[in-house]
Every structure is written in C-alpha cells, then in structure tokens.
Amino acid sequence: MMGSSFLSADRARSPPVKVLSSQLREGTECQTAGGRSEYVIRRLGPGEQRSLQVSVVWMQGTVLEVQSDHNTVLILDETGNFVVSGINSVPKGKPCLSAGKYVMVMGVIQSHSPEPVLRAVKMADLSENAVIHRKNWIYEVEDLQQILP
C-alpha cells in the first residue's frame, strides 16, 4: 500500500503506467504547468504512434545488484537496466531484494538518461511465477499503452 505522504505529495499525478526501461531512456523530459517533471515516451504497439506522458511508472525485471548502503537496486528488464532508489523506505520491499529475484516496482521517475532512475513507492516479489510474469510483461505493457487516451 502506498504511504500517505506519497498520496498527498503526488495527488495530482496520474496512475502508474506500465513501461519498459528503453522507453524511458529514449523519452524526453518536459515540465508540467505546475513545474513538475514528466517524461514523453513513444507507445508500444502497432498503429498510430502517439506519445504518452508519464511521471509514475510500473516496471518489472530481475534484480542484478542491491546496494543497501546507497539505498538503491539495479534491475534488468527485457530492454536494459534501470535503477531504483529509496529502497530502504519501501514497506515490504527489502525481502524481495536479492540478486536473481523477479520484482515489480512502482515509482516516480527521477531521471531517464543515461539510465532510468525511479524513486520507489511500492515493490513486490514476483519470483514465484517469474516465468509467466516475464513472458507476459511486454504484452501487458503494450496492451495498456494502446488503450490509454
């Protein structure tokens, strides 16, 4: 469950959008009217290639390296690495943080280049059904991005 500080501080943010690390890496940063950073990414899938603005994302991948002393974890998805910061303050996040685990991360984008960096809001261990989650992930991302306005 998200903390109340996330909800109150980020009340104006859109719900998380499922993305791949390559989409963030290739995206561009822009500022909202309120001065908050958002990232414009290219949608996955066939048809008209409309862009999509995101600030809170849902990503999945395999834990490569945990640096508890730096409060970060390095994760690999199907398209490359991304870094997640703030791992020491995520409820129930620590148990799923060991190399080789397949995890989901919901977080706020901190930067997109050269490597995407998220500030973690929620993490969950998906290792129990990792084969299924990994196989279906790209389809979930594409499907969601195609139906979003």
Image (tube, rainbow, N blue to C red):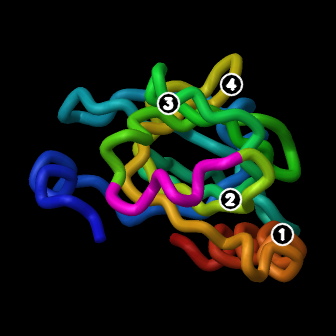
Q: Residues within 10 Å of mark 3 (few under 14, many from 20)?
A: some
Given contact means CB atoms under 8 Å apart, are the residues at marks 3 and 4 in contact?
no
Q: Give the label, 1 or 4, closer to the camera.
A: 1
Image coordinates for residue 1, horizontal then vertical, percent? 29, 71
- Residue at 45% x, 62% y is 16
Tell me which label, 3 or 2, sits earlier in the chain.
2
From the viewer's perspective, is residue 134 above or below residue 33?
Answer: below
The local secondary structure at tag 2 comes to strand
Image coordinates for residue 100, horizontal then vertical, percent? 80, 52
Q: Mark 1 highlights which residue?
A: 134
Given contact means CB atoms under 8 Å apart, are the residues at marks 1 and 4 in contact?
no
Tell me which label, 2 or 4, sits earlier in the chain.
2
Amino acid bearing label 3: Ser
Q: Residues within 10 Å of mark 4 (few under 14, many from 20)?
A: some
Could one spot residue 37 in this view of the protein?
yes
Given contact means CB atoms under 8 Å apart, are the residues at marks 3 and 2 in contact?
no
